[in-house]
Image: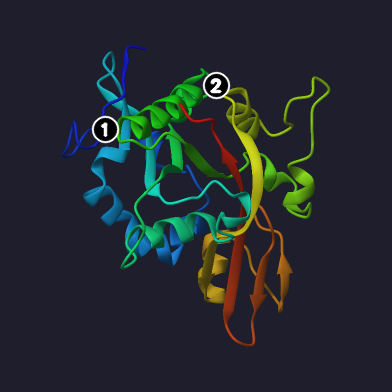
Amino acid sequence: MALQFPTRAERPGRLPHAASLSEGVWPKFMYHDPVLERLFARLIREDAEFHFYVWDDECEEVVAAGNAVPASWDGDAASLPNKGIDAVVEARFAEGAPEPTVLCALQIVIALECRGKGLSSRMIQRMAEIGRDHGLETLIAPVRPTLKHRYPLAPMERYIRWRRADGTHFDPWLRTHERLGAEIVEVAPRSMSVPGSVGEWEEWAEMTFPETGVYVIPGALVPVEIDRERDKGLYVEPNVWMVHPAG
């Protein structure tokens, strides 16, 4: 593949996307975080220089995309927000927000046919480069572990300690970040919150919830809480704060 990594500011407007880039990337419920529903389009519009594409010259398609947001962090692990992604996105548009000091990754999305070819590492490196171009030397990331959905009952604090025989992370996405020099510094226990009615959750999960309780659903890192009497469901997703070295 002959790849380019332009930012949204460098190549604005509508670009052709590989169908697999936008279909089935995340579980349905992930598209219903109220914070991202309200602010993500504004991020793309107002911070275009921090969002980039991977353009394949051979097939003339966008085969991947990366999104990040400038953020303020003092370098103390204890000050990283428990709300992770939601907190960082809300803080970007908060009145009187402090001057950004770091770049915070939001997501990297790669077309199915392009996965497993080392592109994710190149995208993390490109994201860090974009940050440095704007005076933000450190990249931080509330990482969503790739395989955690297979172990929804294991606390994230335990999951991040799992290692393979060679000493590297059990989880491939944590492992990718670690190979690029990133370190785990904290768990973000409430990185994303997705509320909904019972009917909405049954649609998103493609399951029936016969009674009030806690349910394991496909694609979720932890169980979802269902309250039939109040017609409410709530999913609160933990992520993992990782920090890449400056420079």
Tell me if I can see residue 18 in this picture. Answer: no
Give the crowd class for mark 1: few <14, some 14-19, many >=20 residues within 10 Å: many
Q: Amino acid at mark 2?
A: Gly
Q: Between label 1 and label 2, give the one nearer the viewer.
A: 1
Image quadrant where residue 11 sits: top left
Task: Give the CA distance from mark 1 to mark 2.
Answer: 23 Å
Relative placement, left or right, of 165 versus 222 is right
Residue at image point 23% right, 51% down: 46
Residue beneath label 2, please? 116
Image quadrant where residue 32 sits: bottom left
Relative placement, left or right, of 67 versus 157 is left
Q: Secondary structure at mark 1?
A: loop
Q: Secondary structure at mark 2?
A: loop
Query: Can you name the residue that lies furthest to the right here?
Result: 165
The colour mode here is rainbow
Q: Which of disc 2 and disc 1 is earlier in sequence?
A: 1
Query: Can you name the residue that lies furthest to the left here?
Result: 13
Taking 149 as reference, is 230 above or below it?
A: below
Toward the viewer: 148 or 81?
81
Quarter in which the C terminus is drawn: top left
Residue at image point 38% right, 27% down: 129
Residue beneath label 1, please? 7
Quarter in which the N terminus is drawn: top left
Give the crowd class for mark 2: few <14, some 14-19, many >=20 residues within 10 Å: few
Toward the viewer: 159 or 96?
96
Residue at image point 52% right, 76% down: 197
Give how far across and how far down residue 54 sits, in percent.
33, 26
Q: Amino acid at mark 1?
A: Thr
Asked if marks 1 and 2 touch (Cβ < 8 Å), the reply is no
Give how far across and how far down residue 61 sits, in percent.
28, 25
Give how far across and how far down residue 209 sits, in percent.
66, 71
